[in-house]
Amino acid sequence: MDQAESSPSPGQPEPGQPEPGRPARPGRPAPRPVGRAEHEVPALRLEHPVVAGYDGSASSRNALAYAAGLARRLARPLLIVYVCSSGVYCEPLTGQVVGVPRDADALERWLLAELDQVTGHAEIDVHVRTRRGSPARELAAAAEEFSADALVIGAPAHFWHRFAGSVSGWLARHARCPVIVVP
């Protein structure tokens, strides 16, 4: 079952365009606030990274650890991609449409803390990207954009995904690089 098309939210880049970001490790420079409206950040150039899709689940933590080890063994950068929903939902009691902004710096700190927990501070070149839209389509777009050597994701946690379709199933059929699904 195909995932829904993604559409950028206001202030977000078009699909296939890199989001502003900066190398998160080694040397760990002090984070600096970057205002999206103030100036344009140059596009990230990575040579054949290992892309890890991360959503905070137990299987995605395992996938993140596997991807970090693979990146270290292949001497490739690790690109962690976190895909958010549009951040807009309907409040059930009033029917009011509510937009929930996400703090990009807090999200990046959380992702790097998760990486440190699963890898034990491995010395690899790490980059973080947040995208909005369909997880399957956005992960495939990130892998294609950077000519990824591999795309590593966690196995679906819900039994019904095996019948109704899942991110991993869609990626196995449509991604243009090897897809590794970690339980």
Image: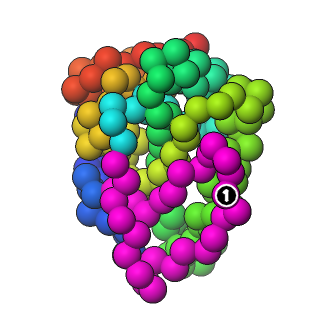
Q: Residues within 10 Å of mark 1 (few under 14, many from 20)?
A: few
Residue at (59, 32) in percent of width and height: 124
Is 28 magenta? The answer is yes
Nearest to the observer: residue 78 or residue 19: 78
**Magenta residues, as a range?**
18-45
Residue 44: % across, % down: 37, 53
Asked if residue 155 is positioned above or below residue 24 in the image, the reply reads: above
Residue, far bottom: 38
Asked if residue 130 is positioned above or below residue 94 in the image, the reply reads: above
Residue 95: % across, % down: 53, 75
SS label for mark 1: loop
Residue at (63, 43) in percent of width and height: 26
Q: Which residue is mark 1?
A: 29
| Rendered-image quadrant of the N terminus | top left
Is 27 magenta? The answer is yes
Residue at (77, 27) in percent of width and height: 120
Q: Is residue 36 left or right of residue 54?
A: left
Magenta residues, dominant SS class: loop
Residue 139: % across, % down: 37, 39
Asked if residue 12 is positioned above or below residue 161 in the image, the reply reads: below
The type of colouring in the image is rainbow
